[in-house]
Image: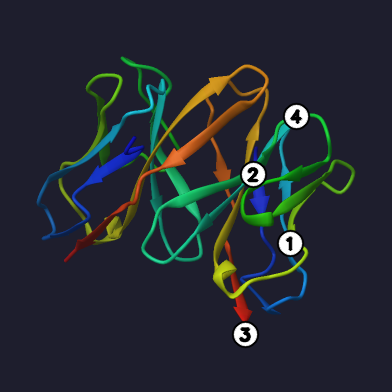
Amino acid sequence: NAGVTQTPKFQVLKTGQSMTLQCAQDMNHNSMYWYRQDPGMGLRLIYYSASEGTTDKGEVPNGYNVSRLNKREFSLRLESAAPSQTSVYFCASSEWVTGLGETQYFGPGTRLLVL
Amino acid sequence: AQSVAQPEDQVNVAEGNPLTVKCTYSVSGNPYLFWYVQYPNRGLQFLLKYITGDNLVKGSYGFEAEFNKSQTSFHLKKPSALVSDSALYFCAVRDGGDSSYKLIFGSGTRLLVRP
């Protein structure tokens, strides 16, 4: 199993450009998440999808949109990129298991630079 | 509101010595607590978690953590540090009464193990 995969690994955008970050998981998990990681701030939740067909805002959703395309795929879109969106973006997925709770598994990340 | 504090930006320890990485939390309900490790240019890897049961939790690579409800702490420990343990460590908490599965991360602690 590949686990959680993300594309691209690295991207440079100019201010105002748009792009979509792709995420896929092969663990048949119901829940998927998008985080951003900034120095000294840990990871902050942008959006999450508790199950196929549902999405909800996290802590820092402004400037982003998401699509839960199917159970495997959860994409993050920046409609008009801003320098403040320069960050490392992580996708994660999880599943609740009775007696064991739920653990989030992370992809390798996408490093985004907005000039 | 949920929150996690990792009071040390960096922990330095000599190889072979015990290590502790500190974490305190605040949630309104029962806490679900997690430790993740991040190696350079990689995603987060799950180390261990506390959901319920024994306060001492054992995880990957010889790490363990102790849940202390009265001190609202979940410190990560290892009896004998290895140089290869050098990485960025994140503590995270979820409110067990929150159905959204949202994790709140601390700001991270860099562990440096010197030979």
What label sits on residue B78 in the rendered view? 1
- x then y, percent, for residue A62: 32, 41
Q: Are marks 4 and 1 on the same chain?
A: yes
The answer to the question of whether label 4 and label 2 lie on touching residues, with beta carbons closer than 8 A, is: no
Where residue A112 appears, as percent x and y from the top left, is: 24, 58
**On screen, residue B90 above or below A107:** below
Q: Earlier in the sequence, mark 1 or mark 3?
A: 1
Tag 4, which chain? B
Q: Do the dots labelled 3 and 2 sit on one chain?
A: yes
Mark 1: few, some, or many residues within 10 Å (few <14, many ≥20)?
A: some
Type of amino acid at the residue the image marks with label 2: Leu
Type of residue at label 1?
A: Lys
Dividing the picture into quadrants, the one containing residue B1 is top right
Give the colour scheme of this rendering.
Answer: rainbow
| Res B89 → quadrant | bottom right
Residue behind mark 3: B115
Circle 3 SS class: loop
Label located before the other in sequence (3 or 2): 2
First in sequence: mark 4 or mark 2? 4
Mark 3 or mark 4, earlier in chain? 4
- Circle 1 marks a residue in which chain? B
* Residue at image coords 28%, 41%: A5
Q: Residue at x 38, y 27 (%)?
A: A27
Q: Residues within 10 Å of mark 4 (few under 14, many from 20)?
A: some
Residue tagged by mark 4? B30
Give SS at disc 2: strand
Q: Do dots 4 and 2 share one subunit?
A: yes
Quadrant the C terminus of chain A occupies: bottom left
Query: Of circles 3 and 2, which is in front?
Result: 3
